[in-house]
Amino acid sequence: MTNQLNKTNKYLYISIHTWIRHKYGSATKCTSENCKGKSKIFDWCKLKEKEYDYNINNFVEMCRSCHRKYDMTEDIRKSLASRNGNKNKTHCINNHPLSGDNLLIRLDGSRRCRECARIRVRKHLQSPKGSERVKAYRLKNKLNTENTQERGTKENGHGQN
């Protein structure tokens, strides 16, 4: 029953947003008072106290950043925080310790195993796609080094006969 309800809600969500875009066009500005003007992507945002209905007064235009902040409730924050399953782990799936020098903390706050990251990079570099990139990188650096050395010898007068 819950799955069917979720499908119905999803259909209603898509249907109403499609109706808004067809009747009123895409959102073109942010009406949030706290907008910093950084985002250039705009959405139709349902007002919290309103129901999903075919009524334009239930929606406002917001930039993507303000829309996410507006929709972010304490329940959603807790739900997202509980998804970070690595925060209480002491070892990765390959039994490497998730502490000290072996711990990578990414910009989003998630934790990763440094040794597993090294292994992934080594495997990638040994793959055909990875080895081609390495060859191209080395060739590019070799050419840059040679050009720099040639310029240096000419400037110093060492390249003249």
Image (spheres, rainbow, N blue to C red):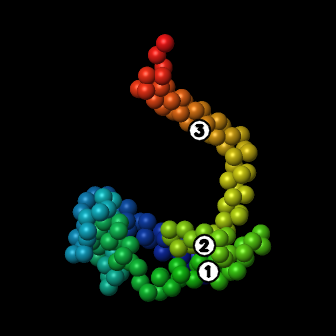
* Camera-nearest residue between 23 and 40: 40
The residue drawn where x is 25% and y is 75% is: 34
Could you tell me if residue 20 is visible in this image? Answer: no
* Camera-nearest residue between 132 and 16: 132
Q: Residue 48 vs residue 107: left or right?
A: left
Nearer the camera: disc 2 or disc 3 = 3
> Quick one: SS at disc 1?
loop
Q: CA distance from mark 2 to mark 3?
A: 29 Å
Which sits earlier in the primary sequence, circle 1 or circle 2?
1
- Disc 3 crowd rating (10 Å Cα; few below 14, some 14-19, many 20+) is few
Number of marks present in the image shown: 3
- Disc 1 crowd rating (10 Å Cα; few below 14, some 14-19, many 20+) is some
Give the residue at mark 3. 137
Amino acid type shown at disc 3: Tyr
Give the residue at mark 2. 111
* Vertical arrangement, residue 25 with respect to residue 126, above or below: below
Amino acid type shown at disc 1: Lys
Q: CA distance from mark 1 to mark 3?
A: 36 Å
Give the residue at mark 1. 87
The residue drawn where x is 43% and y is 27% is: 156
Q: Residue 94 vs residue 107: left or right?
A: right
Q: CA distance from mark 1 to mark 2?
A: 7 Å
